[in-house]
Amino acid sequence: RLRIEKHLADTLVHQDAIKKILQRLGEDTSALKDWTAKLMASGQNLIGTAMSDEVIKGAMTLYVFTHVAISSYTVLIAAAEAANDKETANVLRYIIEDEISMSNWLYGNMPLLTQSFLGRIKSSNVTAKR
């Protein structure tokens, strides 16, 4: 749970960095605000999910989401490089590393999370909530 909360905090830092890029490029940031609101709602739902018996589905959803983010940032980096915007490309490379790190953490911890979840169900005969 702490790692997921850290990722949400990192996402707020990423949001600010992207907002600064958009402002530097003279673009409207209202779409970013809408996207961020949706992202944070999704993140809060994932944390709520991690506290219920849907913990595995929540972890899987976050894993998929990180890969969507990685693919999006990969495209944006390529576009920034094509426009010779090195500053934007560098910021996006920093962000994508955080997303890759979270994805790797989820990948590495999914088996343990699953075993722990199943063990709690088996040993207590009740729904595992954490």
Image (cartoon, rainbow, N blue to C red):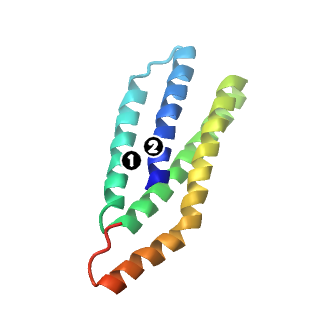
Count of picture labels: 2
- Per the model, the C-alpha gap separating discs 2 and 1 is 7 Å
Element marked by disc 2:
helix
Image position of 49 (left or right of 116): left
* Residue drawn at point x = 72 percent, y = 25 percent: 86
Q: Position of residue 26 (x, y in %)?
A: 52, 14
- The residue identified by callout 1 is 43
| 2 and 1 marks in contact (CB < 8 Å) | yes
Is any atom of residue 102 visible in this view? yes
Is any atom of residue 85 visible in this view? no
Label 2 CA crowd tier, 10 Å (few <14, some 14–19, many 20+):
some
* Residue drawn at point x = 50 percent, y = 46 percent: 7
88 up-or-down from 71: above or below: above
83 up-or-down from 117: above or below: above
Image position of 49 (left or right of 27): left
Element marked by disc 1:
helix
Q: Mark 1: which amino acid?
A: Gly
* Residue drawn at point x = 69 percent, y = 30 percent: 90
Q: Nearer the viewer, residue 123 or 25?
A: 123
Q: Position of residue 77 (x, y in %)?
A: 65, 35
Q: Mark 2: which amino acid?
A: Leu
Label 1 CA crowd tier, 10 Å (few <14, some 14–19, many 20+):
many
Q: Position of residue 50 (x, y in %)?
A: 36, 60
Image position of 120 (left or right of 85): left
- The residue identified by callout 2 is 8
Q: Nearer the viewer, residue 12 or 93?
A: 12
In the picture, the quarter occupied by the N terminus is: bottom left
In the picture, the quarter occupied by the C terminus is: bottom left
Q: Nearer the viewer, residue 46 or 87?
A: 46
* Residue drawn at point x = 51 percent, y = 39 percent: 10
Image position of 108 (left or right of 51): right
Q: Earlier in the sequence, mark 2 or mark 1?
A: 2
